[in-house]
Amino acid sequence: MTAPHPMPPPAVLETPRLVLRPVRRKDIPVIQHRFPHWEIVQYLDVGIPWPYPADGAALYVETCLAEMQRGEKAHWALIPKSGPVDLIGMISLWPDDGVSRNQRGFWLAREFQRRGLMSEAAERVTAYAFCDLGWPELWFANAQENYGSRRIKEKQGARLVDLMIGRFVSGPGPQMVWHLLRENWVARQAAQ
């Protein structure tokens, strides 16, 4: 993928409970330990190898670093401010290619789910896209059965615009497509 306007190198972002910093090679062992669990990968893109290979995190991080170098995507490691000192998940952002209708992806280690951490990270990355990069809209997609991901989009005020068949690690299934306009997001922020 070639970005129409290359993305800048990812900035370090903060939320009340998280630091989002660009992923780095030192994250490989933690990703290899925290990521390959069925509860995390089942609703992710079918391109993720499963069973996850022993070098899966190393290959993934090298891909992330190359995409950031080329200005195609931003990949952040989620680091809790109150510990542990290593990543607990990741979130990525990329420009609209006019085809995929998806511009963000994320995962969170099982033991940190259901605490609102990914909602916090998604909100900060959305602010980065709209306020720092000046993007007018964002597209998101998720497996219909991925209720956690779906809830994040609903909380952000995204509008469900399509239902299609997606290809996931767990197999084909319904995929929800969401659209969020900057002006709607800004208005929601002002109202809160």
Image (tube, rainbow, N blue to C red):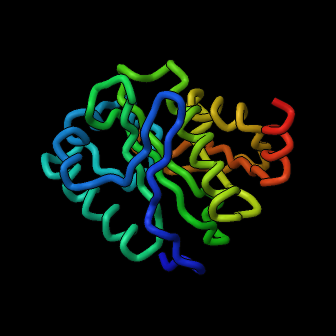
Residue 171 visible within the image: no
Residue drawn at point x = 39 percent, y = 29 percent: 81
Percent across and percent down for residue 177 are 69, 49
- Residue placed most toward the observer, 137 or 80: 80
- Residue placed most toward the observer, 56 or 192: 192
Q: Is residue 125 above or below residue 64?
A: above
Percent across and percent down for residue 144 are 62, 36
Residue drawn at point x = 63 percent, y = 57 percent: 129
Horizontal side of residue 173 vs 188, given as left or right = left
Q: Is residue 41 above or below residue 132?
A: above
Horizontal side of residue 157 vs 27, given as left or right = right
Locate residue 51: give its quadrant. top left
Residue sticking out furthest to the left: 54
Horizontal side of residue 164 vs 81, given as left or right = right
Residue drawn at point x = 72 percent, y = 47 percent: 178
Locate residue 33: give its quadrant. top left
Residue drawn at point x = 45 percent, y = 33 percent: 18
Percent across and percent down for residue 45 are 45, 50
- Residue placed most toward the observer, 55 or 17: 17
Percent across and percent down for residue 74 are 46, 60
* Number of marks drawn: 0
Q: Which image quarter is the C terminus in?
A: top right
Residue 126 visible within the image: yes
